[in-house]
Amino acid sequence: MHFSRDRRSEAGAWLPVIDCWNVGRDKRLPPVSSNEPIGPGASVASEDDPERILAAAAFAYLAGLPMYVFHSASGVRAEQPFESMPWLRHFKTLLAILPRDLPNWEGFDANSDGNPFAAAPSNCHPLYRCGARKDKEFVLVPLALSEAGRSFTAKHDMTCSVHTFPDGGLVQCASVKRGEEFPLKVQAKACVLRGVIAP
């Protein structure tokens, strides 16, 4: 399926990242591939920010999509060598960070009961705090982060680790008690937060 490449909506450059959520989480549909999403040189609109492209791949898996196609250029005619995009190797790093069966986990948005963190403030788009859960494990991909960061209030005791794009580096680890604030301390537009809820 071809998802939106529109960067002019209220969600701006993040709409092409989050547009797959409703389709991917619709249990009435068969598995869907994010085919030819926005990317470098894509027609209609393009995106060459490694953070946003890798976040789009991570978000697609959260949304329940088993496949994400990197859209290297309009028409994908092999006119540009992959070597000119040195950050492409970070797709392999991303896949190492994410659970292999992530598309099969139960998804949640910012305000879902399954979210291990309290509901998002009203000024935060609910799809900017999406994640997926399997038993006590969860993965969250916070989007559209600002320099001020973002804080989350834990609904359970848990341990968390934070990886940033594009290199997947581990930048933060914490044990958080129920009701405590967990401030993201990242200089990034998006990240991967992996956690385990305490028994």
Image: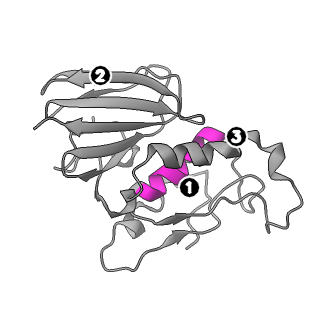
Question: Could you tell whether 134 is left or right of 42 in the image?
Answer: left
Identify the residue under disc 1: 16
Q: Residue 21 occupies which quadrant of the picture?
A: bottom left
Mark 1 residue type: Pro
User: Going 38% across and 65% down the picture, which residue do you hit?
Assistant: 22
On the question of residue 49 being in view, the answer is: yes
The kind of secondary structure the magenta stretch mainly shows is helix
- Please check the rendered image and state whether residue 52 is part of the magenta-colored stretch, yes or no: yes
Q: Tell me: residue 74, above or below residue 156.
A: below
Looking at the rendered structure, the secondary structure element under dot 1 is helix
Q: How many residues crowd mark 3 within 10 Å: few (<14), some (14–19), many (20+)?
A: some
Q: How is the image coloured?
A: one colour
Of the 4 image quadrants, the one containing the C terminus is: top left
Dot 3: element: helix
185 sits to left or right of 167: left
Residue under label 3:
87
Q: Quadrant of the N terminus?
A: bottom right
Looking at the picture, does residue 99 appear above or below residue 197? below
Residue 112, position as x, y percentages in the image: 21, 50
Image disc number at residue 174: 2
Which portion, as a residue range, is magenta?
49-61
State the residue at coordinates (89%, 60%): 79
Above or below for 149 versus 87? above
Distance, label 2 to label 1, CA atoms, is 31 Å
Q: Residue at x 46, y 62 (%)?
A: 20
Which residue shows up at 70% across the image and 40% down it? 87
Instruction: Name the mark nearer the viewer: 3 or 1.
Output: 3
